[in-house]
Amino acid sequence: MAITSDVSNDGKILKISIDGRFDASSLDDFRRAYEEVDSNSLESYCVDLKDTVHLDSSALGMLLVLRDFAGGDNANIVINNCSPEVKKIFAISSFEQLFTIQ
């Protein structure tokens, strides 16, 4: 499991990529991926699940914490490259009302 983060060249988008399992063991790495970045000029966050092989309820909680960190109702967070199974989990959890799911 690896979690990496990169800020776009214009400094407006933070992309967090999750490779492997996204579960409770990811908590510290996921938090560091956005807390250790200068967020003053960030306008949006992108969580890339392209290489994620498993996602559990603790991952949903971590995404909600990211949303709070990014501004709550004003947060602009896109979760992309979701598998059909993950999209179904997000739909059941009503995450589509809180995040942009792609």
Image (tube, rainbow, N blue to C red):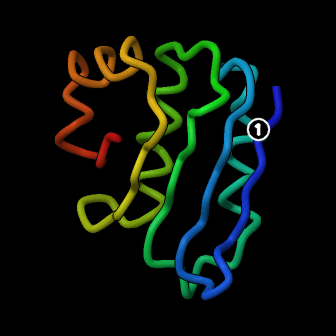
Residue at (27%, 68%) from the top-left corner? 74
The residue lying toward the viewer, choosing from 28 and 84, is: 84
Q: Is residue 19 placed above or below 88 in the rendered structure? A: below
Residue 3 location in percent, x, y? 76, 40
Dot 1 surroundings within 10 Å: few (below 14), some, or many (20 or more)? few
Question: Label 1 is placed on what type of residue?
Answer: Asp
Out of 86 and 31, give the one closest to the viewer.
Answer: 86
**Residue 102 occupies which quadrant of the picture?**
top left
Q: Which residue is mark 1?
A: 28
Question: What percent of the width, then of the height, locates residue 95?
Answer: 26, 33
Left or right: 21, with 15 as reference point: right
Instruction: Specify the quadrant of the image occupied by residue 54.
Output: top right
**For the residue labelled by badge 1, is the local secondary structure a helix, a strand or a loop?**
helix
Say whether residue 102 is left or right of residue 60.
left
Does 39 appear above or below 83? below
Residue 4 x/y as whole percent: 78, 49
| Residue ID at (44%, 78%) | 43
* Image point (68%, 72%), residue name: 7
Residue 81 as seen in the image, left or right of residue 76: right
